[in-house]
Image (cartoon, rainbow, N blue to C red):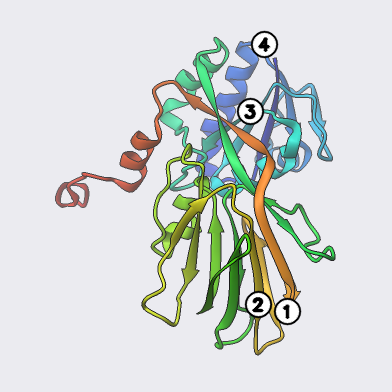
Amino acid sequence: MKVGVFGSICRNEKQTLIKRMFEKLSDVQAEVFVDCDFYSFLTHTWGFAPVVAGLLEGDIFDLDLAFSLGGDGTFLKTASRINKQGIPILGINTGRLGFLADTGSNELDDTLDEIFKNYYRTEERTLLRLHTKERLFTGYNYALNEIAVLKRDTSSMITIHAFIGDDFLASYQADGLIVATPTGSTAYSMSVNGPILVPQSNSLVISPVAPHSLNVRPLVIPDTSVITLTIESRNEYFLVALDGRSDIFPAGALLTISKADYTTRIIKRDNHTFYKTLRDKLMWGADTRFTSL
């Protein structure tokens, strides 16, 4: 089995976890390929040179599985590298919260055993596509979590005129607007009080950021909807961020957001459900009187 390992700069205390993963991959005789930047970090910073079949450069890979070592940010970068190739991704958490990278250090051995015995499932996750008449976003114009339109370098709000299909929705006076997938509903959108969507809900959520009107609330719409946005700004520019990757756009630009024509495949253990992740990560039902002791 060909396994690609992608990662980011990790704290020193994560060395044991990462070395154990490479040992496990060697034990099951996996053909291991490592992202060249991550391999450089391992060798130059930690002095650790795992045995690999090759290094991964560019964005085209011949892999059966991809492992993302880090937090959700690293997972999003890995997903953008995988792009349309349909390679399933396992997120191994060396960060903090981790909704996408939800395999913890205490689960690593069992998870890898199950994967190499084919005891796992994959979930298809929706992505968003950003389209503009002229190519304004210079990078990868798809997002697994969200597309955010935000004010830039000023205390003044921006005005965002939003249409759903041919129907006018609203003119948001706010610091910004977030269009999130179900996967992204537990990310930036959740931090501005957007609803949590289950991954299979076939919906999108539109969440304003610090709206001027108290009547404006997040809105859930079908993921077949096409969203069109135009933006007014006193600063003449605004920011567009796709999963944290941002570019500056001129005021008046027309943005079209729609569901992508492909999905990201995420590896999940058979006993890992979205509801269990919510309980574990958000501590639903936990008694904080005891967890704080």
- For the N terminus, give its image quadrant: top right
| Residue 9 appears anywhere in the view | no
Q: Which residue is mark 4?
A: 29
Q: Residue 252's mark?
A: 1
* Three-letter code for the amino acid on which mark 4 is drawn: Gln
- Direction front: furthest residue: 166
For marks 1 and 3 on the same chain, the one whose residue lies earlier in the sequence: 3
Q: Is residue 185 left or right of residue 139?
A: left
Where residue 88 appears, x then y in whole percent? 63, 28
Percent position (x, y) of residue 81?
A: 74, 41
Marks 3 & 4, CB-CB < 8 Å contact: no
Q: CA distance from mark 3 to mark 4?
A: 19 Å
Q: Under tag 1, what secondary structure?
A: loop
Judging by the rendered image, the residue that carries numbered circle 2 is: 231
Residue 88: assigned label: 3
Q: Which mark is residue 63?
A: none
Q: Nearer the viewer, mark 1 or mark 3?
A: 1
Of pointers 2 and 1, the one earlier in the residue sequence = 2
